[in-house]
Structures are given as structure tokens and as C-alpha cells.
Image (cartoon, rainbow, N blue to C red):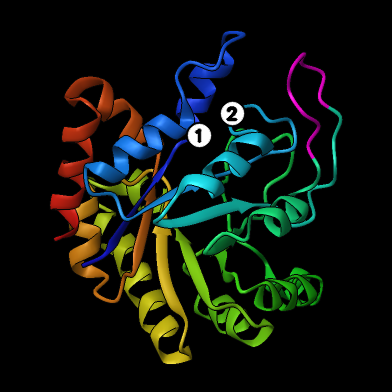
Amino acid sequence: MTALSINLNKIALIRNSRDTDYPSVTDHAARCIAAGAHGITVHPRPDQRHIRADDCYELAAMLEVEFNIEGNPFAAPMKSDRKGVSDYPGFMEIVRQTRPAQCTLVPDTNSQLTSDHGFDLRRDGDKLKPVLDELRKLGVRSSLFMDPDPEQIRLAKAVGADRIELYTGPYAECFGGSEQETELAKYILASETAAECGLGLNAGHDLNLHNLKHFKDAVTNLLEVSIGHAFTVDAIELGLDKATRAYLDCLR
């Protein structure tokens, strides 16, 4: 079965809209796990707009399922301008202190609203090699956020990644339209390329209860999906427990 990792960024975003610890990120992680989720994902950005560094430390201390931390490995330390919020120590320092099961590296910038493209390894491959080497020494599985481009996927293997996570935004945007199957074919080819290279395959971004099952059925070697935005919306309508089980049903 493809593993379901719940991204808790939006829970933290709601919390950060007030000067409070409610809703609790760790409590929501525990509820997702109790409902059957296989893992928890967070993306601690330097501005700590949602998940904060302290959330990562607290989750690392309590989780008994896979913990996936994603972010830009070159994100530098940043001072916090909010009372009671610790400074951001830099992305790789968070990883060193938490030793998650998986670290998904993403080429986002501080000004991006959300992750919206994969790495260009022709440009960034040499910079990423020492990061991937460090993750391996830390005992952390690496994954690179990638577009469904076979040439780039082969480069992901060459620079030393353990897995890739396919950016599924374009598939989700086309879903239900005339270009759906044409777009999906790119992901099928990407998955076949990953398998040929010996790379594990994850996917994420804009997957939801409407488009997930079709994607999972087509991309047969999919190991894990990470879902947060749509999951949070569905949890408002269905309740967190039912939403978790609904996503698990899509992956069976």
C-alpha cells in the first residue's frame, strides 16, 4: 500500500493567526496517526509562517511513525520577529537536531507562496551532492522534489538521492480536463524512469480525494504521498479522523 504522510503546515498556520498554542500541531499529529496515517510531514520555512523550528523538535520527540521534514537545504538562519517564537536556526541544523526518517529537499525561496517546481540538477546538482552525503551520514533518507522530467530524474540518481518526490501540481491542475491523460502520461514515464534508476518514488502537491486514486492507480510504483492543504480542507468538512481514512481508502 502507498504510504500516506499528512502535512501539518496548515494546522500550524491556523495556530499562528493568534498568539496561542491552539490548535496543537502535536495533538493533530497524534490524531492523524491514530486514524491510520503512516507518517507526518512538515515544511519549516525561514519566516516560520506556519511550522516553526520548535514544532519540529516536539514532533521528533513524540512520533513513532515516519517523520518527513521538507525544505530548502540552503535556507540560512533567520531572526524571529515574533514574541515567544525562537529564531530559525537554518534548515539543515533542524535536520541535524531531529534526524527525521526522511528529508525532502525542495528548491523554494523565502518569497514563494508554496513549492511550485522541482530542482534543475544541471544547475544545482553539484551543490546538492554534499548535502545528500551529509544526510546519508546522519542516517536520514533523502528525497529530491522533482518535475516529471526523465533526464532530471536520472541526474537525481547520479547526485546520490535515495528517492524523488514528483511535483504533482500540473497533474492536479489538468485533472478532469482534456489534457488529464496527456499530463498523467508524463508522470507514468517519470515513475518508470525512477524505477529503472533504482530511485524510490514519492509524490505530492494538490493531490486530493478527487484526483489521488486515479494517480495512484496509474503510477504503480508509488511509495508515499504527502498531502496537507486539501487534507485540511477535507478535515473541516468530514472531521479529521474520517478525512484520514478517506485518503487511506484512495491508496488501497
Task: Tell me: 252 left or right of 31.
Answer: left
What residue is shown at x 64% (from left), y 27% (from top)? 49
SS assignment at label 1 = helix
Q: Amino acid at mark 2?
A: His
Question: What secondary structure predominates along the stretch shown in magenta?
Answer: loop
Task: Tell me: 90 left or right of 71.
Answer: right
Tell me the number on the disc at residue 9. 1
Position of the C terminus, as image quadrant, is bottom left
Location of residue 32 in the rendering, given as x and y in whole percent from the top left corner: 30, 40
Residue 209 occupies quadrant: top left
Estimate the spatial distance between the alpha carbons at disc 2 and disc 1, rounded to whole Å: 6 Å
What residue is shown at x 37% (from left), y 69% (from top)? 186
Q: Is 215 within the magenta?
A: no
Disc 1 crowd, CA 10 A, few/some/many (<14, 14-19, 20+): many
Q: Residue furthest top?
A: 18
Location of residue 23 in the rendering, given as x and y in whole percent from the top left corner: 45, 19
Instruction: Tell me which segment is drawn in magenta.
Output: 80-88
Q: Is 87 within the magenta?
A: yes
Q: Evaluate if marks 2 and 1 touch, with contact meaning CB atoms under 8 Å apart.
A: yes
Q: Is residue 106 shown to the viewer in this render?
A: yes
Disc 2 crowd, CA 10 A, few/some/many (<14, 14-19, 20+): many
Q: Amino acid at mark 1?
A: Asn
* Pointer 2 residue: 50
- Of 101 and 2, which appears nearest the observer? 101
Residue 1 occupies quadrant: bottom left
SS assignment at label 2 = loop
**Picture layout, residue 56 above or below residue 134:** above
Tell me the number on the disc at residue 199. none
